[in-house]
Image (cartoon, helix red, strand yellow):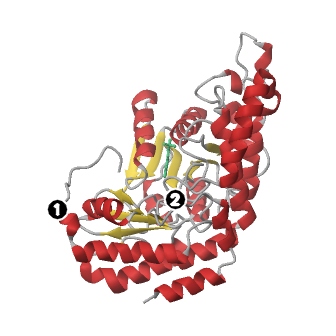
């Protein structure tokens, strides 16, 4: 099993080690939840301070001359650097859930003969709620398929669910529980053969794994910026629409930021050409600017190097789980093949909730708990060290051996 010395050695050999100094890291806290809220890039604190005092404080409304193009400018940065899209295919707007609604509703309305959305029962709940809402409000039908809880949706699973009424197939690229990567290319091919469009949720994959939207011929996508991209709490999300689809999808919410001639104040709504039509109202400029530094840091580190380190980190978690924690009741709930998983690992234990409480309260380890029995460890490779990952596993072993978690309340907190 990995020793502390070996973990230290891996940190010494890590070509990405210097990136940790560009994030705020304080004390001895072990943070394995960067896939829920990424650490703060130090430069973001400075650039926001400038934006507030200069852009807002001094420039006031004249700053809109530069702010107005930020959604497409930062969208293009994510598009070209992180998700394999072309210029003009990605824009920053609203939250992931709202973008999912906009794109799914637009896609449903585009084809009157098809009204079924296919997704998987293990998909992120907010996505499923959005689809249920569309089913209730647009007369659509949600068809859920049961997939392997560890490996997630496979092309064969989809094959059985398709018919000529399916408009849209929507999965997460990386599953929020198990971390399984869906085969975007094959699934998209199967969906297209059945005449359906694909809508991918990239929240747990952008910045963690290689995403190639154009190469996979993906149609639509949404994704989160406050996880691996370190955009900060509530930072707006991004959405992607394949170039040749943009003009045939009419957004369900008609707002002035999506209007072709926004400042003509015409009575009639005429959607803008291209990706801008998927904007709605005034973007949250401060949060929007907070995204840029994180995106540039990930691009500078390079997804290939990040992926290589991520694989070593998640492999260490799995190895230590097998060798030290299995006898204490834990099991691995993530794919064992590193090619098949993202940058977080599900560690299963029947008492996972109280174990998470004990890790936070007694050991200064911040994981996530996910229902019903998962301690989730996220290890964003840009700032997570091997020693930190090793510590996270050692302290988990201590919690299990000491057994003090058994005296904690088992009722769920407001946020888990
Ligand atoms: C985090 C996450 C979201 C977040 O949606 P919000 O609208 O930003 O709250 C959506 N989908 C998935 C798969 C996620 O992991």
Q: Which residue is mark 1?
A: 407
Is the C-beta separation of discs 2 and 1 under 8 Å? no
Where disc 1 sits, the SS reads: helix
In the rendered image, the residue lying farthest to the left is 407
Which x, y percent locates residue 302? 72, 67
Q: Is residue 122 above or below residue 260?
A: below
In the rendered image, the residue lying farthest to the top is 267
Q: Is residue 400 above or below residue 90?
A: below
**Which residue is depicted at the point 32% across and 59% down?**
361
**Which residue is depicted at the point 48% across and 74% down?**
389
Can you see residue 68? no
Pointer 1 residue Cβ closer than 8 Å to ligand 1? no
For this view, does 106 lie left or right of residue 87? left
Q: Which mark is residue 41?
A: none
**Which residue is depicted at the point 81% across and 33% down?**
66
Which x, y percent locates residue 119? 45, 50
In the rendered image, the residue lying farthest to the front is 27
Can you see residue 182? yes
Label 2 to label 1, Cα distance in Å? 28 Å
Which of the two discs, 2 and 1, labels the residue nearer the N terminus? 2
Which x, y percent locates residue 70? 75, 38
Q: Which residue is mark 2?
A: 34
Q: Is residue 229 above or below residue 383?
A: above
For mark 1, does the 10 Å Cα neighbourhood hold few (<14), some (14 to 19), or many (20 or more) residues?
few
Between 397 and 141, the one nearer to me in the picture: 397
């Amino acid at each position: 099993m990995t020793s502390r010395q070996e973990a230290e050695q891996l940190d010494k050999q890590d070509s990405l080690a210097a990136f940790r100094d560009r994030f705020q890291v304080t004390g001895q806290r072990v943070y394995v939840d960067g896939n829920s809220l990424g650490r703060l890039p130090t430069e973001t604190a400075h650039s926001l301070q400038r934006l507030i005092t200069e852009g807002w404080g001094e420039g006031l409304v004249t700053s809109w001359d530069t702010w107005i193009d930020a959604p497409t400018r930062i969208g293009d940065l994510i598009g070209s650097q992180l998700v394999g899209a072309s210029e003009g295919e990605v824009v920053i707007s609203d939250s992931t859930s709202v973008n999912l609604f906009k794109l799914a509703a637009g896609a449903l309305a585009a084809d009157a003969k098809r009204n079924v959305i296919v997704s998987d029962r293990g998909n992120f709940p907010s996505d499923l709620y959005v689809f249920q809402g569309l089913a209730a409000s647009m007369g659509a039908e949600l068809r859920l398929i049961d997939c392997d809880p560890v490996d997630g949706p496979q092309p064969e699973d989809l094959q059985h669910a398709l018919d000529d009424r399916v408009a849209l197939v929507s999965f997460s690229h990386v599953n929020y529980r198990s971390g399984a990567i869906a085969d975007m290319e094959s699934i998209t091919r199967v969906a297209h053969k059945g005449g359906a469009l694909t809508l991918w949720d990239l929240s747990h994959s952008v910045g963690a794994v290689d995403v190639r939207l154009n190469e996979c011929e993906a149609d639509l996508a949404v994704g989160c910026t406050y996880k691996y991209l370190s955009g900060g709490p509530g930072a707006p999300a991004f959405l992607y629409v394949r170039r040749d689809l943009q003009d045939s999808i009419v957004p369900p919410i008609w707002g002035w930021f999506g209007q072709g001639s926004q400042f003509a104040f015409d009575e009639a709504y005429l959607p803008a050409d291209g990706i801008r039509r998927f904007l709605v109202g005034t973007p949250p400029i401060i949060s929007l600017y907070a995204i840029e530094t994180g995106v540039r840091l990930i691009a500078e580190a390079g997804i290939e190097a990040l992926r290589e380190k991520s694989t070593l980190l998640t492999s260490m978690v799995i190895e230590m789980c097998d060798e030290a924690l299995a006898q204490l009741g834990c099991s691995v709930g993530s794919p064992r093949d590193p090619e098949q998983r993202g940058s977080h690992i599900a560690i299963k234990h029947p008492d996972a909730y109280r174990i998470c409480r004990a890790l936070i309260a007694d050991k200064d380890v911040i994981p996530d708990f996910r229902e019903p029995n998962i301690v989730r460890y996220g290890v964003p490779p840009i700032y997570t060290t091997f020693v930190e990952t090793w510590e996270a596993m050692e302290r988990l072993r201590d919690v299990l051996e000491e057994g003090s978690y058994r005296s904690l309340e088992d009722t769920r907190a407001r946020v888990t």
